[in-house]
Amino acid sequence: MKVLFNKARRLAGMTGLIFALSSGAAVAATPKDALVVGWQFDDIITLDTAEVFEFSGAEITGNTYDRLIGYDPEDVSKIFGVAAESWTVSDDGKTFTFKMRKGIKFASGNEMTAEDAAFSLQRAIVLNKSPAFILSQFGFSADNVKDMIKAVDADTLTITTDKAYAPTFVLYCLTATIASIVDKTEVMKHEVDGDMGFAWLRTNYAGSGPYKIEQWKPSEIVVLSANKDYWGGAPAMKNIFIRHIGESSVQQLLLEKGDIDIARNLETEQLKSVDGNKDIKLLKKGKGSLYYLSMNLKDPILAKPQVQEALKYLVDYKGLEDTVWAGRGQVQQAFLPKGFLGALEEQPFSLNVEKAKGLLAEAGYPDGFEIEMIVRNAPIRIDTAKSMQTTFAKAGIKVKLIPMDGKQVLTVYRARKHQLFFGAWGPDYQDPHTNADTFAKNLDNGDNAKSKPVAWRNAYAPEQMTKDTLAAVLESDAGKRAKMYLAIQKAHQQQAPFAFIMQEQEVAGLRANVEGYVLGPSFDSNSYKDVVKK
Amino acid sequence: MTELKSWLLAENPDSRAQASLGRAYLGWRRFFCNPLAMIGFVIVTALLLMAIFAPYIAPEGITSGLTGAELKEHRFQPPSAEHWFGTDGQANDIFSRIVMGSRITLIIVGIVIFTAPILGFIIGTVSGYFGGWIDVVLMRITDVFLAFPKLVLALALAAALGRGLESAIFAIAITSWPAYARLARAETLTIRKTDYLAAARLQGAGHWRLISGHIMPLCLSSLIVRVTLDMAGIILTAAGLGFLGLGAQPPTPEWGAMIAEGRDYILSYWWLATFPGLAIFVVALGFNFLGDGLRDVLDPKSGGQH
């Protein structure tokens, strides 16, 4: 009994301590010149812009590096110069000449020149990490890139493509994370064994953006500090502390208490409960991010077309839109998000257990089967996956749900070692080719393929669709091009091992005094640059 | 009835059976008079009954299977006459899930208490009985396991073995045997030099016979007490692993995992995490009370002082 009593006493002591701590924290507002953000960023693997291909990493580098050009987040058709002041396109449509902006300084103090820009793009091609295809699709390779991308003098950069592509397509690609400009002198100082500073830049910073990366502790914190010499004017917030807060309920609580200024991962149910709170406002933005279920064709069961079709009929699209995704997403069943050129808006699939059962019987699984589904451990994804678990079970398919960290899921997925994967895809740039390229094109389905698009990750290699995709990107007439994409999506919708489910609407909860925070149409265009606190 | 009672309480029992039955009766009386022990006993019995008859008690099973408009209407319902403990985001009845979850809790506890203590018991008695280098080797292995915090080691094991109930059970079993080994060894050391063991040895009893026939029965009562007291710890460790996502995977209604699922909604829908939490609390308390009561009864050193 005495042991129990001691335990109780200790527990009482602890509770008192926690209470004292929490009541102390409640009165502390964040400083005027610092922004504190609560966010889930467990998917950051690297900070090297030549490798970043994750939602969170792209947002961090988007705020800390300059690219040659940018677009207006409110109207993506408005493209303007950033590190490049102006540009011209040659008559044959193959050579782009950029005039660099003067007076841009890197965090190291070095002046940015055309040489840095050329180096950054060449480096991305030579390193050839996951996102390298965004640039290499213009015919660049490690052998020729030094000739194709050149700094003519300190102010002039020329880029020559192998074919005449639609100019906007080329320019949109240059707005992607991989086209960020790194500080050549600084990066090469840390070169080890000819890695072009890759090992160093993965955890360090050599950029010129409005903010500098001070610190990144995986799944803990990212600290950004203002770049006082930023060419567009120093940002108002001296520091931005982005804390990894995995639980959205904790984010809600901290936001309500004023311990954080922005909560990035409020869930559907929490949006309801903060609605009407005077101290909190909600910022909403329709995103290009699509949530989809993909089936690895390496698995003999999933390789059967009837099984793939059956699974598409076993998702409760409407129910998900009304419950888990209420106010945060809309059903979209094609690989282009609404708002993109040529996006297909038809929705042929709905929950139809009888039809799915028939298809499964045809495929030889009248009683269903057991299968594993990997998913990142974030509430909205888990809840969606659970809904699928329930509806799949109606046709006898037993889903074993395996929630993992963002990092782990991506590692398994990119090595195509999954069976079912539920996750998200965000366009890398604002041209329809970005999604067509990854979902509908696979040039080499071998295990050691050079480029590994999402289609490859699921061992999906459609020959005709690959050809159509490559043809669509060369079409300069926008109307014809849109029709080509519609046709590709229709075929893709029926045949491909992907069930597109939801198009995201991102919602951030802000303290009422925070202004100027921008949620862009893609994940790398969320911007802290103009944030001020009233 | 009174005859039976006087037979049980006879000052000079006629047989060994009568003596031990009398002893058991006295123990039961002492146990019965201890209110806390009885509360524990009732809770644990109720848990057992609940687990056995779970499918009859739980009205709706572990998943509702609702979709579309029906799902929208029935999810996140507060506690009511229809759903005693409310419903969760998939419109599953939380009361049913807790009832079904009692089976998982009992399976974990059951498997762990029939593996870890036995393993620890054998290692401890062997180590204490033989002494010398066997003792040194076995105890150093035990030290290695004791050098890690239990939950951290279990976490590492469960993560390495892959998520799932089986690996959680294995991890808990692997991390909980050293305490029993220590206990059994200490008990063995106090009796290994006794005269009756020497006498048995002189009569030609082998090592195994001495350990199993003489030493183990003497250590058993303290082991049982320890196991009962540990059950609460086992339940909490299992719930902890489930909470951290390393135990049972959805939709299995493991209580710890249910709390983890509920924590995202704790500000809007308190009942999601509260009821599984209460279930863990009540059951852990029950096992603790039961363990305390059993110690009073079984511990030979405090025996007969009431």
Image (spheres, coloured by chain):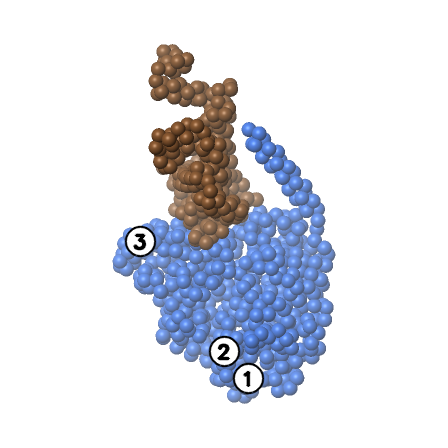
Which of the 4 image quarters holds residue A45?
Answer: bottom right
Disc 2 to disc 1: CB gap under 8 Å: no
The residue lying at 64 percent from left, 65 percent from top is: A213
| Residue sitting nearer the eye, A152 or B113 | B113
Q: Secondary structure at mark 1?
A: helix
Q: Secondary structure at mark 3?
A: loop
Which of the 4 image quarters holds residue A37?
Answer: bottom right
Q: Amino acid at mark 3?
A: Gly
| Residue sitting nearer the eye, B255 or B144 | B144
Q: Quadrant of the N terminus of chain A?
A: top right
Q: Chain of mark 1?
A: A
Disc 3 to disc 2: CB gap under 8 Å: no
Single out the mark in the foreground, 1 or 3.
1
Q: Earlier in the sequence, mark 2 or mark 1?
A: 2
Q: Earlier in the sequence, mark 1 or mark 3?
A: 1
| Residue sitting nearer the eye, A207 or A429 | A207
The residue lying at 50 percent from left, 29 percent from top is: B292
The residue lying at 69 percent from left, 76 percent from top is: A110
Cα distance between the residues tagged 2 and 1: 13 Å
The residue lying at 39 percent from left, 13 percent from top is: B12
Rendering colour (chain A): blue
How many circles with numbers are drawn on the protein?
Answer: 3
Q: Is residue A523 left or right of residue B112?
A: right
| Same-chain status of marks 3 and 2 | yes
Q: Earlier in the sequence, mark 3 or mark 2?
A: 2
| Same-chain status of marks 1 and 3 | yes
* Residue B102: numbered disc: none
Cα distance between the residues tagged 1 and 3: 55 Å
Q: Which residue is mark 2?
A: A136
Q: Which residue is mark 3?
A: A368
Q: Amino acid at mark 2?
A: Ser
Q: Is residue B232 above or below residue A301?
A: above
